[in-house]
Amino acid sequence: RPLLTERKQLSSHQFHYPDWSAPLHHSHTTIKELIMRVILLLACLIATVSAFGTSSFTGSSVAGASNGSSLSMMRHRKKIARLGKPADQRKALLRALTTEVIRHGRIKTTHTRAKAVRKHVDHMIQLGKRGDLHARRQAMGWIYDKDLVHSLFEAAPERYADREGGYTRVLRTMPRQGDNAKMAVIELV
């Protein structure tokens, strides 16, 4: 068991913090210590920012992969109109609009939806012109009404025999009253 004087000696060998209020010009060792501490502080800040800071891809904060979040990038050259809906709702909307355009010949909807559904209506008419069993089953998988598919496959070859594409026309109309959305009429040619 050490004596009391030995305990005081042990406590005197503890780490000595530099006096920051003292002038720095008298010793090179304190300047070196200061530079090393600043470099260490900057390295810690850079490591923290790179781990939890902002991403250069999106500008939003990026958490680690352990949280299950993923890095999302900008959708350059992705031409599909997302229509503000998830994929399943978007597909159901486009199927319903395609069915109604083929059933009624013309419908009024927003301009963005009309441009999005035009591709699907043209494809269904192209399938109707082809007329084989595989084309009929593909049309059955998209159009909701089975009888409408049969009438499309009967009428499309004669009606669009001289036309190789562009079976629909999108005409702009007046904006919608409530929210001033751009409206359009999509019709079969």
Image (cartoon, grey):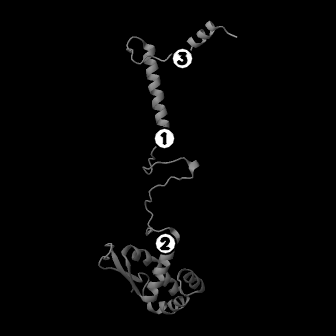
Q: Residue at x 45, y 80 (%)?
A: 97
Residue in the foreground of this view, choosing between 10 and 94? 10
Q: Is residue 40 in view?
A: yes
Q: Residues within 10 Å of mark 3 (few under 14, many from 20)?
A: few
Residue in the foreground of this view, choosing between 162 and 134? 134
- Could you tell me which secondary element the residue under label 2 belongs to? helix
On screen, residue 86 versus residue 107, left or right, reads right
Q: Which residue is mark 1?
A: 50
The kind of residue on which mark 3 rests is Phe
Q: Which residue is mark 3?
A: 15
- How far apart marks 3 and 1 lie (CA) works out to 32 Å
Disc ID at residue 90? 2
- Labels 2 and 1: the sequence-earlier one: 1
Vertical arrangement, residue 26 with respect to residue 66, above or below:
above
- Labels 3 and 2: the sequence-earlier one: 3
Q: Quadrant of the C terminus?
A: bottom left
Q: In the rendering, at what x and y percent does residue 132 appear?
A: 58, 86
Q: Is residue 160 in view?
A: no
The kind of residue on which mark 2 rests is Arg
Name the mark nearer the viewer: 3 or 1.
Answer: 3
Q: In the rendering, at what x and y percent does residue 59 appear?
A: 42, 49
